[in-house]
């Protein structure tokens, strides 16, 4: 039993070490992208690439993504993230997550008129997981950033297979409030690895104490 438990604990610790290296690579990629200036959008951009895209935002084809509570001037507010397609000549529409908007708001949503340039970072398309909240395409409410599903609900037969997350300050009208920086995921894998390896060491010590007492008996 001790050998089986030891193998499990060491395996968990080793898995966390692998996860640590994986997370460090992602954080390095994010730091590099954060420091880099926006570049023109190409056909196959890497996730988290900072880009600047010019087109026409369709206010009439808006969708909502996720829910989040934030502190506002009026106090804590429940809100969602506004998604609109950016139409570009000679290219498929690009879904843009423009930022957070409260469900109850006194200020209107700022809508650029005519051609506009959106700066943001690339977010890879997602697929719903086993425990994902169920989307409501009829109401244009979504909980998974699946470009094809969102595009179909907006009546768009073909959209880019990724999402553009807008970056920048809030406009004078306040809403939507775009992201201020790229994602900054926590990296706790080293502490997890130390925990699992520490439990493995404790298990060995307990076994040695037990074995010593048993042999003396």
Image: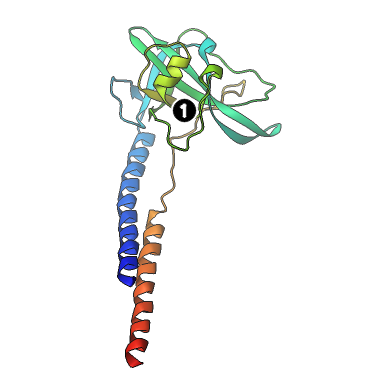
Q: Residue at the location (35% across, 46% down)?
A: 23
Residue 198 drawn at (x, y percent):
38, 68
| Residue 17 horizontal/vertical position (percent) | 31, 55
For residue 122, which quarter of the picture? top left
Under tag 1, what secondary structure?
Answer: loop
Residue furthest bottom as drawn:
216
Question: Is residue 82 left or right of 94 when viewed as pictured?
Answer: right
Q: Position of residue 186 (x, y in %)?
A: 44, 47
- What residue is pinned by disc 1? 167
Q: Nearer the viewer, residue 154 or 119?
A: 154
| Res 4 quadrant in image | bottom left
Colouring scheme, one of rainbow, by chain, secondary structure, one colour: rainbow
194 or 203: nearer the viewer? 203
> Local crowd at mark 1 within 10 Å, few (<14), some, or many (≥20)?
many
Q: Is 42 positioned to the left or the right of 88 in the image?
A: left
Visible in this render: residue 118?
no
**Residue 99 position (above or below residue 191):** above
The residue positioned 34% from the left and 58% from the top of the image is: 12
Which image quadrant is residue 64 in?
Answer: top right
Picture coordinates of residue 194, whole percent (x, y): 38, 63
Residue under the point 39% across and 21% down:
52
Q: Quadrant of the C terminus?
A: bottom left
Total numbered labels placed on residues in the image: 1
Q: In this rendered view, identify the residue nearer to me: 65 or 28.
A: 65
Residue 173 in view: yes
Q: Name the quarter where the N terminus is drawn.
A: bottom left
């Amino acid at each position: 039993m001790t050998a089986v438990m030891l193998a499990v604990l060491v395996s968990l610790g080793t898995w966390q070490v692998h996860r640590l290296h994986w997370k460090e690579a992602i954080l390095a990629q994010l730091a590099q992208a954060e420091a880099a200036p926006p570049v023109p959008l190409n056909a196959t951009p890497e996730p988290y690439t900072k880009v600047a895209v010019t087109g026409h935002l369709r206010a009439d084809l808006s969708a909502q993504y996720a829910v989040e509570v934030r502190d506002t001037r009026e106090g804590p507010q429940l809100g969602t993230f506004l998604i609109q397609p950016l139409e570009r000549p000679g290219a498929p529409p690009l879904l843009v997550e423009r930022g957070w908007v409260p469900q109850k708001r006194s200020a209107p949503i700022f809508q650029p008129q005519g051609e506009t340039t959106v700066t943001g970072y690339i977010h890879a398309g997602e697929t719903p997981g086993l425990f994902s909240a169920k989307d409501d395409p009829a109401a244009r409410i979504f909980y998974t950033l699946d470009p094809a599903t969102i595009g179909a609900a907006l009546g768009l037969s073909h959209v880019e297979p990724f999402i553009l997350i807008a970056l920048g300050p809030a406009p004078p009208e306040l809403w939507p409030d775009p992201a201020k920086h790229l994602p900054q995921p926590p990296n706790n894998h080293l502490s997890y690895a130390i925990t699992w390896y520490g439990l493995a060491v404790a298990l060995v010590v307990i076994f040695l104490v037990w074995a010593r007492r048993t042999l003396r008996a």
